[in-house]
Every structure is written in C-alpha cells, then in structure tokens.
Image: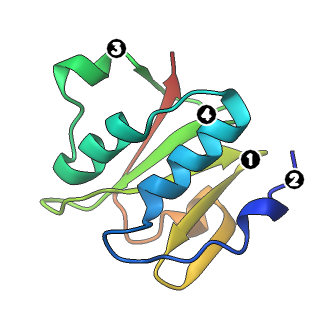
Amino acid sequence: MSIDPYLDRMYIPRVYTCYHFVAEILKDRIGKDLSESLAHLFNTGKLSKSHVRLFTEVKVPTDYNIVIMQRPNVNPPHMGVFIRGKILHLHRKGVEYQPIDIASRGFPSVRFAKCN
C-alpha cells in the first residue's frame, strides 16, 4: 500500500483531525466506516459500550491497526494508523510517517487496536 494518497491531508481543527484521517484510511484500505466510533473515542477518550465490539486491543500491532496515543488526564487522544512498522498520523503540522518511538514522543500511553 502506498501512503502517497494521504500525504497532502491538512489538519483543520474540528473539521479534519487525526481521527478523520484514521477513519478515511481504514475506510479506503479495509472497507470499514468507523468514523462514528472514532469520533466518540476522539471526543471522550473512551469507547462507548456500543462501539467497543468494533475493536480489540492488541499488544503487537499489524498493518491497519489503530494507534491510540494518550497523555495523562488529557483528552482527546491522538490517533494514527500502523502501516509497515510505522505510524501514519496527522497533526497540526501535517501528515507524518514515523517509527513508533518517534511518533509517540510525549505520549506515555500508546495502545493498539484492531478492527473486528
């Protein structure tokens, strides 16, 4: 999978954020529309009971797993997509494709979730 189609995306507060970016990639690549569930996770930092069945937390990520990066007592979490050993994510400066240790700097909690 080429990440090139996603490299031009721009962060627009409350319009197109990291969770919109993740939802777009997952819809394109695995055919699942998770925008509502990801919006809830992004806005609350938690999955609701109705959304939790859509995801399974995993210890070792594989391609197209969601990466949830969290700071203590800070919501919303930051999100990206695990692809070929790196995290593709969108932040205020634009899209980056980075190794986990670089992308997760400043986030003491990093979790991975696969879509069911």
Q: Which residue is disc 4 drawn over?
A: 61
Residue type indicated by callout 4: Pro
Is residue 61 left or right of 68 when viewed as pictured?
right
Counting residues from the N terminus, which is met first, the one under dot 2 or under dot 1?
Answer: 2
Q: Element under label 2? A: loop
Residue 53 marker: 3
Image mark for residue 85: 1
**Which of marks 4 and 1 precedes in the sequence?**
4
Estimate the x, y position of residue 37 in percent, counting from the top left: 34, 34
Say which element carries label 1: loop
Give whichever of discs 3 and 1 has the lower sequence position.
3
User: Is the residue marked by circle 1 packed among few (<14), some (14-19), or many (20+) residues within 10 Å?
Assistant: few
The amino acid at mark 1 is Gly
Gap between marks 4 and 3 measured at Cα = 18 Å
Between 63 and 36, the one nearer to me in the picture: 36
When the figure is inspected, residue 64 is found, relative to residue 53, above or below; the finding is below
